[in-house]
Image (tube, grey):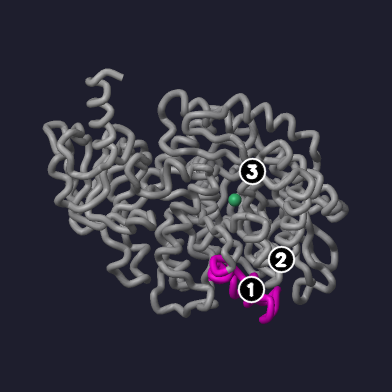
């Protein structure tokens, strides 16, 4: 090594040490004048962050930024705001939700009358014949979670209407749609699905659950690739505005993956996207080869294509979740599994053997148990590997299964926004479970205390993609829009730092991104979100009032609020 080389390496080493040494080059961006919450246990908070190129170059005191500022440096004064690692949403439907934004959007309708008014408006605005397609209505707006075709007929009778509920596990159709699908009193319920009917005559009433939805949805014109791409653009725009820099898109087919790859190629992908490939519960292990092909074709850059998504059951509000004991008031009916346990075990074992991360929708206590059983068998069969399998939604628990998550290394992927006493809980969940089981709904604190890894997600477009109301509910277990509402199952509240961890380091773990993201540390990717206030300085009930000022991915500003600090 020449003397010059030795000197250069010494300078590089000194520069790498961070510090206030003058040898480093100047920064592209400096964030100062607020609180930097790093999620790095070695230095939980700081006053400033310096970004050079794609990376974080300095984290520390405001005094330490001087030497980084040069002619080309943008200095952003935070005005008492807060910098966090970019949020990571561990279960969302960015593409599908974005596509649905172009349909008739019923998500903001406050009651049944408003839902119908929006449907009427959509029908008037889009008067082309053919299907009227929409979604996002709340089941709780209708008696028993059971909207009727006759009610829809009063608004639109001359063309078929197909509307999905906000959770996408039920569909509401008009009489013409029932007729076109040839659904009559004689039509049997499909496996793992239910046609809601008049109790005496068996005549379909207009609500379809789970696989019964496909009896009508298969008649809809398929989405075009252009619609997918446009939808993905809309979904990504929302994600940027909420400070989300990484996510796991929860259920995708080959065309969806191609849409992601196209935007990635064009430089339009503004988040690290982990794509969960949809698995057909009926098809069995033979389909895994196709998933392997997709993984090999598209992996790389901002895309990670190594997850397989599997539905094991439905949802409690439609009485389709699989329970260990029957639903209250429904005889011996305990819901159903999407596939029997033997098929589940085989499928999970094959996915694990092929080194997929297995992402399971499990809501009822039976679904959680059989999923854990299947993952345990897979690790016995294939050997324990760093699979980071995760169970999403995980609503109703048998207490004896809580410790198994940590023991098996399975991540608890909660949607914390759902953990307060809204009508889904008080009208469509607790009455069907009874008081004893209802103590074990969304036990986030119990999972955290058990040592399990926890990650959070929105399940958009089932619910808002904004992490802040979800973070608030995790801390308060209250309605985020009503600070005087009661705290529901308050023993399961967790502190703010735990909630932030689930949306940063927890997500980074699930997305296999912890070596480059999830914390604010020198050398990591500058994936950051800037909020307009320090969440630790405000009442927990005000967390959802905070606004995203700026979002950065790889050091690039991908979102700046119109009202941003300068
Ligand atoms: Zn989902």
Rounded to the nearest angstrom, the CA distance separating label 3 from label 2 is: 22 Å
Residue 81, quarter of the rendered image: bottom left
| Residue receiving disc 2 | 365
Please provide percent x and percent y for residue 45: 30, 58
Rounded to the nearest angstrom, the CA distance separating label 1 from label 3 is: 27 Å
Residue under the point 53% across and 43% down: 512
| Residue receiving disc 1 | 440
- In the image, taking residue 32 as reference, residue 371 lies left or right, namely right
Residue under the point 68% across and 63% down: 404
Residue under the point 73% across and 55% down: 371
CB under 8 Å between discs 1 and 2: yes
| Residue receiving disc 3 | 357
User: Which label's residue is closer to the chain start, 1 or 2?
Assistant: 2
Compared to residue 254, the image places residue 542 above or below, namely: below
Please provide percent x and percent y for residue 389: 64, 49
Q: Residues within 10 Å of mark 3 (few under 14, many from 20)?
A: many
Residue nearest the viewer, comparing 260 with 389: 389
Residue 20 shown in magenta: no
Magenta stretch: give its range.
422-449
Please provide percent x and percent y for residue 366: 75, 63
Helix, strand or loop at mark 1: helix
Residue nearest the viewer, comparing 251 with 318: 251
Q: Residues within 10 Å of mark 2 (few under 14, many from 20)?
A: many
Please provide percent x and percent y for residue 121: 49, 49
Residue nearest the viewer, comparing 526 with 10: 10
Residue nearest the viewer, comparing 24 with 97: 24
Residue 434 shown in magenta: yes
- Give residue 122's mark: none
Helix, strand or loop at mark 2: helix
């Amino acid at each position: 090594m020449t003397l010059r080389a030795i000197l250069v390496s010494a300078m590089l080493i000194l520069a790498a040490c961070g510090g206030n040494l003058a040898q480093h080059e100047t920064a592209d961006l400096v964030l100062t004048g607020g609180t930097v919450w790093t999620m790095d246990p070695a230095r939980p908070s700081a006053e400033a962050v310096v970004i050079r190129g794609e990376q974080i170059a300095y984290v520390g005191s405001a005094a330490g930024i001087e030497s980084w500022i040069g002619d080309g440096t943008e200095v952003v004064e935070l005005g008492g705001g807060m910098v966090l690692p970019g949020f990571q949403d561990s279960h969302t439907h960015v593409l599908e939700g974005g596509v649905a934004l172009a349909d008739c959007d019923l998500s903001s309708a406050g009651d049944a009358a408003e839902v119908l008014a929006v449907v009427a408006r959509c029908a008037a605005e889009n008067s082309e014949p053919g299907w009227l397609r929409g979604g996002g209505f709340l089941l709780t707006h209708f008696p028993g979670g059971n909207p009727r075709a006759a009610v829809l007929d009063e608004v639109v009778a001359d063309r078929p209407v197909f509307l999905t509920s906000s959770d996408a596990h039920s569909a509401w159709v008009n009489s013409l749609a029932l007729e076109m699908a040839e659904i009559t009193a004689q039509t049997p319920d499909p496996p793992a699905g239910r046609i809601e009917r008049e109790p005496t005559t068996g005549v379909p009433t207009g609500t379809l659950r789970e696989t019964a939805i496909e009896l009508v949805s298969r008649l809809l014109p398929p989405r075009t690739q252009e619609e997918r791409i446009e939808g993905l653009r809309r979904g990504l725009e929302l994600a940027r505005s909420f400070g989300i820099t990484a996510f796991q898109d929860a259920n995708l087919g080959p065309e969806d993956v191609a849409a992601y790859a196209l935007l990635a190629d064009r430089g339009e992908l503004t988040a690290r996207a982990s794509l969960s490939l949809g698995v057909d519960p009926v098809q069995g292990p033979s389909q895994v080869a196709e998933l392997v092909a997709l993984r090999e074709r598209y992996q790389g850059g901002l895309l990670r294509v190594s997850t397989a998504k599997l539905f094991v059951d439905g949802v409690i509000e439609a009485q389709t979740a699989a329970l260990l004991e029957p639903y209250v008031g429904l005889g011996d009916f305990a819901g159903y599994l999407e596939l029997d346990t033997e098929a589940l075990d085989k499928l999970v074992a094959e996915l694990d053997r092929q080194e997929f991360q297995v992402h399971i929708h499990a809501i009822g206590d039976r679904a959680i148990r059989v999923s854990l059983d299947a993952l345990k068998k897979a690790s016995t069969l294939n050997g324990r590997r760093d699979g980071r399998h995760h169970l999403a939604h995980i609503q109703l628990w048998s207490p004896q299964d809580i410790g198994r998550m940590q023991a098996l290394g399975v991540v608890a992927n909660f949607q914390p926004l759902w953990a307060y006493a809204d009508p889904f809980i008080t009208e469509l969940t607790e009455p069907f479970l009874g008081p004893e089981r209802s103590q074990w709904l969304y036990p986030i604190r119990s999972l955290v205390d058990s040592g399990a890894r926890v990650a959070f997600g929105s399940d958009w477009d089932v619910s808002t993609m904004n992490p802040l109301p979800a973070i608030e509910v995790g801390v308060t277990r209250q309605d985020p829009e009503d600070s005087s509402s009661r705290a529901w199952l308050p023993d399961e509240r967790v502190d703010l730092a735990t909630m932030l961890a689930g949306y940063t380091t927890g997500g980074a773990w699930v997305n296999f991104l912890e070596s480059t993201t999830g914390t604010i540390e020198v050398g990591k990717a500058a994936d950051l979100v800037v909020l307009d206030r320090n969440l630790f300085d405000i009442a927990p009930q005000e967390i959802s009032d905070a606004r995203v000022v700026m979002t950065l991915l790889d050091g690039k500003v991908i979102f700046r609020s119109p009202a941003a600090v300068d």
